[in-house]
Image (spheres, helix red, strand yellow):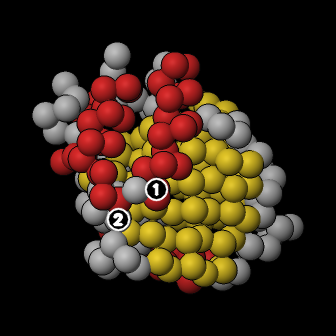
Amino acid sequence: MPNCNNLIQAHYSDQDDLDSALTQGGLALDVLSNAATPLNVEIEFRYTPCARVLSVSGEPVRVARGSRQVSRDDGGFLGVLFQRMDHTLCSQRGQQQVITPGEITVWHGRQSLDFRMPDRFRKLCLLVPIERFEGLLPDPDSMSALISKQAQICLSYLVPVLALLPITCSRAMKNLATTLWR
């Protein structure tokens, strides 16, 4: 993994280039763009000691993750998606969820999922190594996409701060875990 001072920012209009960049960033996904809407996505990767941070924006697109993608990375992380603009339709574990601005969802890197962004969107994603939660959560591998509304409100403030404060990672991860499971 690049050191925590690295910031990689790029615009993608080619599906293979975006797939490759995401995989190199530690998140293997299938990018499925619509022929009617050419691929147009911008990603800013930031590496911190506690998480990989992706700021993502673009035109309508769909991304999916299944067993093939999990085999290309280790899946040993929890993903925290914070929606900044428009909405994301998330399908995982047989459930569907609409994530609107200011809301979050949490997902496990070893689980299949499908994110659809039907309109221009902007979001922040944290990929937190699962080891950060061991000893803090009863069973991080059973993490559910659906969390309480109170936890969503707390996380909507915490997630953007986590992206900017790599020095306080351990304390922030403990606070995140405590908030999620109260």
Q: Quadrant of the C terminus?
A: top left
> Is 51 in front, or is 17?
51
Q: CA distance from mark 2 to mark 1?
A: 8 Å
What SS does tag 1 mark?
Answer: helix
Up-down relation of residue 81 to residue 145 (above or below): below
Are the residues flagged by discs 2 and 1 in contact, CB closer than 8 Å? yes
Residue shown at 48% from the left, 40% from the top: 158
> Is 41 in front, or is 51?
51
Determine whether, in the image, residue 62 is placed left or right of residue 175: right
Q: Residue furthest left?
A: 135
What SS does tag 2 mark?
Answer: loop
Residue shown at 57% from the left, 79% from the top: 9
Residue 59 at x, y percent in the picture? 78, 63
Q: Quadrant of the N terminus?
A: bottom left
* Amino acid of disc 1: Ala
Crowding around mark 2 (Cα neighbors within 10 Å: few <14, some 14 to 19, many 20+) is many
Q: Is residue 85 visible?
A: yes
Instruction: Answer with the quarter of the image where residue 61 lies.
Output: bottom right
Up-down relation of residue 82 to residue 121 (above or below): above
Residue 80 at x, y percent in the picture? 46, 45
What residue sits right under mark 1 in the picture? 163
Residue 89 at x, y percent in the picture? 66, 41
Up-down relation of residue 166 to residue 45 (above or below): above
What residue sits right under mark 2 in the picture? 48
**Between discs 2 and 1, the one toward the N terminus:** 2
